[in-house]
Structures are given as structure tokens and as C-alpha cells.
Image (tube, rainbow, N blue to C red):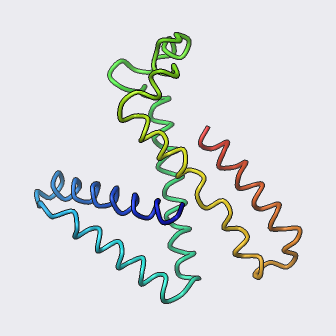
Amino acid sequence: AYVVFEASLIGIFSFFFQNFMQSQLGIHIHWIIPALLMLTVNAILTYFDVNLTAKVLGVFLVTEIVMLALGALAVLVKGGGPQGFAVAETINPIGAFSPAAGIAGASAGLGLFFAFWSWVGFESTAMYGEESRNPKKIIPRATMLSVLGVGLFYV
């Protein structure tokens, strides 16, 4: 799973980096440049120190949660899309949340990507077993709490 997701992350990072540089700075760069940049940063973080990598990941995790929470809050306060927050579509079986709408077109692949990606990493609590005082008690509890926490957050 991690090999596949690393490739997809490099692709999506390259796309958004290229898009940001074009739209905000007017600079067009080839997608391979941000891809190589990401691979280089990953290699440096992997090579030097796991504690540094954990701190960097912690910052990005907090940033991700804050950004997702702000996006959800903005939709609740301002409304989603041009028509606002469409509660009627959630009741209508032919609306946006019908099974047929979820498996049609590019949205199916994107939905599967986010569904799989939201669960990658929950098992990383086992890597820190040596660091804890009582790994047989703490690691299963931390894993269960992370699965429940991620599940509730993404729902």
C-alpha cells in the first residue's frame, strides 16, 4: 500500500505544486521538478533522524486536521457550492449521495483514493512500542483510539 500511495502522493504533490506556481507566481515548471524535490526531501528525512521525521509529520498532521476542520466549518457556515448547503439532495435517492453517483466518472477513483488514504498509517503505533513503558497495554489502545479517531473525524 505504501509503495502505491507514495507514487500517488508524488503525482498529486507535483500537480498541486505546479498549479500553485502557475496560478500564484506565473511560473510554469515541469512536473518532474516538484516530484524530484519531494523524493529528495523524503530521502533526507529518512536517512538522518527518525525523531526529526516524526516532528515534521506531526506538524503536517496538525496542519491537515486544521485545514480539514476549517473547510468543514466554512461549508457549514457559508454553504457548499454555488447553490449553498443542499440538504434536500441528501434525502433524494437520485441526488448527489446516491450509489450510482458515487461510482460514475472520475469521482469513483478520487473517492477510492481518499478512502484508502485516510486509513494509511494507523498501524504506525506499533513502531513506537519500544519507546513506551508498557507496549502490550499501550500499543493496542493507541491503535484502537487512532482507528476510532480517524474514522469519526473523516465521517
Q: Quadrant of residue 109?
A: top left
Left or right: residue 118 versus residue 30 is: right
In front of the other: 90 or 56: 90
Q: Is residue 62 above or below residue 40?
A: above
Q: Quadrant of residue 107?
A: top left
The quadrant of the rendering that contains the N terminus is bottom right
The residue positioned 53% from the left and 17% from the top of the image is 90
Counting labels gives 0
Q: Is residue 79 above or below residue 19?
A: above
The image position of residue 55, as x and y in percent, is: 55, 75
The residue positioned 28% from the left and 74% from the top of the image is 36
In front of the other: 94 or 132: 94
The image position of residue 5, as x and y in percent, is: 47, 59
The quadrant of the rendering that contains the C terminus is top right
Q: Quadrant of residue 152?
A: top right
The image position of residue 130, as x and y in percent, is: 77, 82
Left or right: residue 111 versus residue 18 is: right
